[in-house]
Image: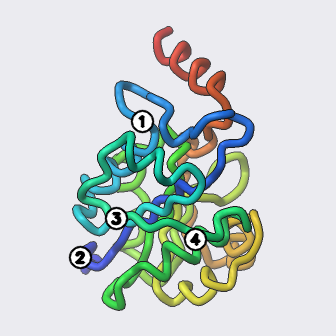
Amino acid sequence: MTASLDNVYAVILAAGASTRMGSPKQLLVWENRTLLEHAVLNARSLLQERCVVVLGAHAEAIQASINLNGASVIVNPHWQEGIASSIRAGIRALPASANSAVILLCDQPLIGAEQIRTLLNGWQNEPSRIVASYYRDGAGVPAVFPTEFFGELLNLEGDRGAKKLLMKFDESLLKIALPEAALDIDSAGDLETLTVSRQI
């Protein structure tokens, strides 16, 4: 019997300052929607309203520019401390009923509903394990974390995100090959290159 998704939540990390970009990468347009809208729509297509978006830098501009209705939006006042602070904020925002969280980044445009569903399927079959994307010979996010690991997520510090935790539990991870997760957008040029490659 597979585990139910009824108490699984998405935590979308979108608090970064996009310093290399010069403008909020969350608002870059990819296939007629912003990167953040893509992440929200993909998560909500599977988990409905159980979606938390963590904003930080540019929070007001982002909320004024796009419609995040249907997602719970929180602003991490400590975003400058690094991505770990946004993970902590997102986990703290989950209700007590949550039994796992899938952590997503807003700057991985090739991660769609199909890839998230693949990770969730893995979790449904083995709900006590962390289910992580596997790419570039290593585990990373997106990843599904059962509640047993929420304490570990709340203890993360700095700018290394969940990678440190995935390395710590490497031997017990369920790793699922998701080469699409290898692409993250750091500049407008990255998105241009991707757009051109998709047209060829």
Labelled pair 1, 4 in contact (Cβ < 8 Å): no
> Residue at position x 39%, y 66% from top?
52
Task: Give left or right: position of 145 versus 124.
Answer: right
Place of residue 109 in the rendered image (x, y in percent of width and height, measured from the top left):
49, 38
Query: Is residue 34 depicted above or below 176 in this figure?
Result: above
Residue that carries the numbered disc 1 in the rendered image: 34
Query: What residue is pinned by disc 3?
Result: 51
Say what amino acid the circle numbered 4 marks.
Answer: Ile
As rendered, which of 112 and 66 lies closer to the eye?
Answer: 66
* Label 2 vs label 1, nearer the camera: 1
Name the kind of residue labelled 1 in the image. Thr
**Residue 118 sits in which quadrant?**
bottom left
Q: CA distance from mark 4 to mark 3?
A: 14 Å
Q: Residues within 10 Å of mark 4 (few under 14, many from 20)?
A: many
Q: Which residue is mark 4?
A: 87
Q: Earlier in the sequence, mark 1 or mark 4?
A: 1
- From this view, report whether residue 126 is shown above or below residue 44: below
Q: Amino acid at mark 2?
A: Asp
The disc placed on residue 196 is none
Q: Position of residue 26 (x, y in %)?
A: 51, 42
Say what secondary structure mark 3 lies in.
strand
Which mark is nearer the camera, 2 or 3?
A: 3
Residue 189 on image: x %, y %: 65, 22
Q: Which residue is mark 2?
A: 6
